[in-house]
Amino acid sequence: MTVWIPGEADGEAQKRHAPATLRNRDAILAVLRATLPASGLVLEVASGSGEHAVHFAAALPALDWQPSDPDPAALASIEAWRGEAGLANLRAPMLLDAAADWPIDRADAVLCINMTHISPWEATVGLFRGGAALLSSGAPLILYGPYFHADVAPAPSNVEFDASLRARDPRWGIRALEDVAALATAQGFALDSVQAMPANNLTLIFRRT
């Protein structure tokens, strides 16, 4: 298992702040309380700043929380937040690229927040492929973020956001719910529920078949 080893420069200066975290963390937490198992290991893919990991681990002390990210600066931020929080159930962050081989062989749930639209499609493919290898039947894989839905008119803000993402990197962009669900099915998951969230976001809950 590969984990981030903190260095001498870690500390307050290493922390990243994601303003959206304060706005969405409690809405996401409410879904997690209803969806995650009572105990076990949760792998968070693309943990970013680490603020979500600290908030969720503090609120769900019976679960072990494994944050991860492919970006060394994000790993440093996660470790800085983790060091400040001092939570026994929050593990050291793991270097994990969703599109590559995963340095972990089991988990009881997988959570991924705001990754699919700011990464190449291959990362989403890797997310479901990796999740399928880790999770047992019925275990959840949970996605949060903006998605387009064929039966729902897109919010103008999401259309603008999608255009800005594609301008930054043509491999990025808000994904179609139908495309994600089809990928999930091909990788051994079933879409269990779709929950509307604040600011035109969705939570997608998949279950390992």
Image: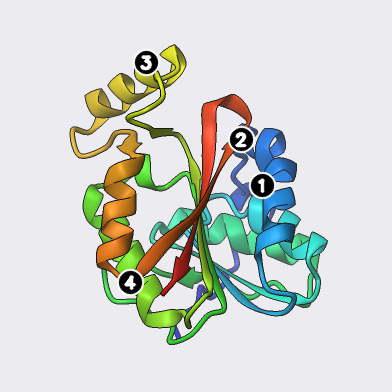
Q: Position of residue 15 (x, y in %)?
A: 63, 49
- Depth check, mark 2 against mark 4: the one in front is 4
Residue matched to label 2 = 197
Q: Position of residue 31 (x, y in %)?
A: 68, 51
Q: Could you tell me which secondary element the residue under label 2 belongs to?
A: strand
Q: Is residue 1 left or right of residue 170?
A: right
Residue matched to label 4 = 188
Question: Do the residues bearing badges 3 and 2 touch, measured as CB atoms within 8 Å?
Answer: no
Instruction: Identify the mark nearer the N-term, 3 or 4.
Output: 3
Q: Could you tell me which secondary element the residue under label 3 belongs to?
A: helix
Q: Residues within 10 Å of mark 4 (few under 14, many from 20)?
A: some
Residue matched to label 1 = 28
Residue matched to label 3 = 160
Give, as a three-letter code, the residue at label 2. Answer: Met
Instruction: Identify the mark nearer the N-term, 3 or 1.
Output: 1
Marks 1/4: CA–CA distance: 24 Å
Residue that lies at the very extreme toward the top in this rendered image: 156
Residue 20, labelled with which disc? Answer: none
Marks 2/4: CA–CA distance: 26 Å
Give, as a three-letter code, the residue at label 3. Answer: Glu
Q: Position of residue 42 (x, y in %)?
A: 60, 72
